[in-house]
Image (cartoon, rainbow, N blue to C red):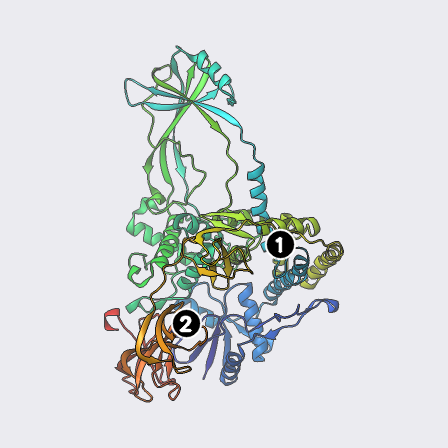
Amino acid sequence: MANLVIMESPTKASTVKGYLGSNYKVVASNGHVRDLPVSRLGIDIENGFKPHYINIRKKGDLIKKLVKDAKSATTVYLATDPDREGEAISWHLANVLGIPLEKTKRITFNEITKTAVKKAIKNPRPIDMDLVNSQQARRLLDRIVGYKLSPYLWKTVKSGLSAGRVQSVATRAIVDREKEIQNFVSEEYWTITAMLSANGGKPFKSRFFGIDKKIELKSKEETDKVLSHIEGKPFTVHSVKKSVKQRTPAPPFTTSSLQQEANKKLGFSSSKTMKIAQELYEGISLGAHGTNGLITYMRTDSLRISEEAAEAAKLYITEHFGGEYYPKTPRIYKTKAGAQDAHEAIRPANLTYTPMQIKEHLTSDQFKLYNLIWNCFLASQMASAQFDTVSADIECGGYTFKSSGSTLRFAGYLSVFEITDENADENESASLLPELNVGQILNKKDILPEQHFTEPPARYSEASLIKFLEEKGIGRPSTYATILTTITQRGYVTKEGKSLHPTALGNVTTELIKENFSNIVDYSFTADMEKKLDDIEHGDIDMYQILADFYSDFEKDLNSAMATAERRIVKTEPELTDILCEKCGAQMVVKSGRFGKFAACPNYPDCKNTKPLAKDGKSLKESKPVITLEGEVCEKCGAQMVQRQGRYGTFHACANYPKCDFTRQILQSIGINCPICQKPIVTKHGKNKMVFYSCSGYPDCSFSSWDMPTEKKCPDCGEMLFRKKGKSLLICHRENCGYKQEIHDDEA
């Protein structure tokens, strides 16, 4: 073996293997291979915060294989993701593989394309320890807070709770917003709208403004005073202003803006957005075009794009829309201060792969997200939209009324894409006002006074919370999805529709932490810590100094809080179902378990009755019929076998359950015989409901495969060909053959 390339993801490894050829073996580490131990803190605080890393449990066999591959390779390239986390993974790999730091060859690429990968191979660099230390500092800080603060919550609230450095701040934001809503005092205000027309034309709206400055109408009395004053007086055009306004496109997506827009336009959660973006980045099989990474790296807060991408956009725009749709000078967006500019904004890796052209190769969700990214990037490079606008001041009885309107003059980037603006004025007229002249008297059609009341601020959605965290400088693009997932899974926040609500548990824990660990949930303190992590990355500050400074104050707060800790009672109202317990007649409530929500009797432990719930969380699931299997008996107790429904589908089970727990999967033949013993191959279900293929002669025959066997034979060695899972690709069964063949779906 000449060269070994180690990546994080098996999917990426498969894509890159197709670019490098037979002189390279490309394997995956499946993320980190070393981490802090789970069962203890793993940080020697007394000796300078030295971390104690161990090989991750269950990765022993993988590590042995990687070590073996590395020893037989001439060159080892560490090709993990191009960010702090990826750099740290490469550093851990180098330690596990015994590669001295000065001899490491670290390669990164912002997009998984043949050109980018080959360019990276030609330009390896050493591991950047400043990047590694920045990641280490974050990991150690989070571990210290989590492992030191959680026992305090166990003592004061309940056992099993956990606290997080950034997650606690995000929970606080939701708790604070809920308090704003509860404490909000609505205020009355009024508006007056005049419906006017010119020369008998179509009526248009004109809104009451005031005199020299805007007058706020706070009551019906104030409104009636204005109405009586203008009664019977003419509406006269005082001034008219016409102009051409330009609207510039939004920049290409960063991680934050992608998550926000996908949430608003597509209804995707942040975690779903990042999962799909990861798939698009790692590579999708495009049939005859092979496997290609479709977007650039999706964890970024940079707005920069490469010169090659800008030129490709220019060529596409001028060719498909015309020269007038490209701006006079290329668009360059300024990245905000404090952003990490290690790689580009999120954009298509290849503009020629238009969403519609490759739609058949994508899932529905992949297509929606790729279409969003492709359109946003293209629009960001296009000419501004132009609007003809007109505004008029209209005088009546000494008061000023204002009218405005606009029509689209030149679509520009709007012909492709526009960012959702939740603050846009819905009342803005979609068309121009009629031709108006100064001094012209208008016809009054109607006067419409309306009473309104101010409304409290809206609860955070995932999109607006991400925007808040970004504006405050809390967290980083790669952490937002994890933050939101964590605070909901831990029961501090619930999601109702798109709105995030704090739970009673979230309220209590937030108040406790605010009282005793004010820095932990302080917005400015958390943002300043992010800046210090950036300083570590840039080599401006030592990570151990940051840890020492943080811990000196944190330890004092912790000792004081533990000494005065008092138990807090969390009062929660049970969520009722429409199910009555058939054992005791009580109305059953919703409970959560390891497999999700279920209905339980509220009289537990006196009554332990439970039932499954339907998707609406209220009604009982329709019971699946139990089918008796004539002639089949249990191998354990000899009782009748029946067919049941489970989490992984239909299965056969003993009718004496739960006294006898014997079960058997339903084995369905795929019509192809085992390449080892020639017995029929059957489908089976593994973890996470994943289907795999196994010999029906198991355990006498050990053949199994995640890839689907076919009747086709390898033209090189004659072995059976397998269809690669999730790919339009046939591969040879013989491990050292290496034959592969792209296929179309109708050939499968």
Residue placed most toward the observer, 657 or 5: 657
Against 690, is 371 above or below? above
The amino acid marked with disc number 1 is Lys
- Measured from the top left, where is residue 559 in percent x and y? 75, 58
Q: CA distance from mark 1 to mark 2?
A: 35 Å
Q: Residue furthest left?
A: 746
Quarter of the figure with residue 605? bottom right
Residue placed most toward the observer, 48 or 134: 48
Q: Is residue 373 left or right of residue 61?
A: left
Crowdedness near tag 1: few (<14), some (14–19) or many (≥20) residues, C-alpha within 10 Å: some
The residue at the point 56 percent across, 32 percent down is: 185
Crowdedness near tag 2: few (<14), some (14–19) or many (≥20) residues, C-alpha within 10 Å: many
Label for residue 613? none
| Residue holding disc 2 | 16
Q: Is residue 154 left or right of residue 263?
A: right
Q: Is residue 427 left or right of residue 485?
A: left
| Residue holding disc 1 | 531
Question: Does residue 420 show up?
Answer: yes
Residue placed most toward the observer, 182 or 58: 182
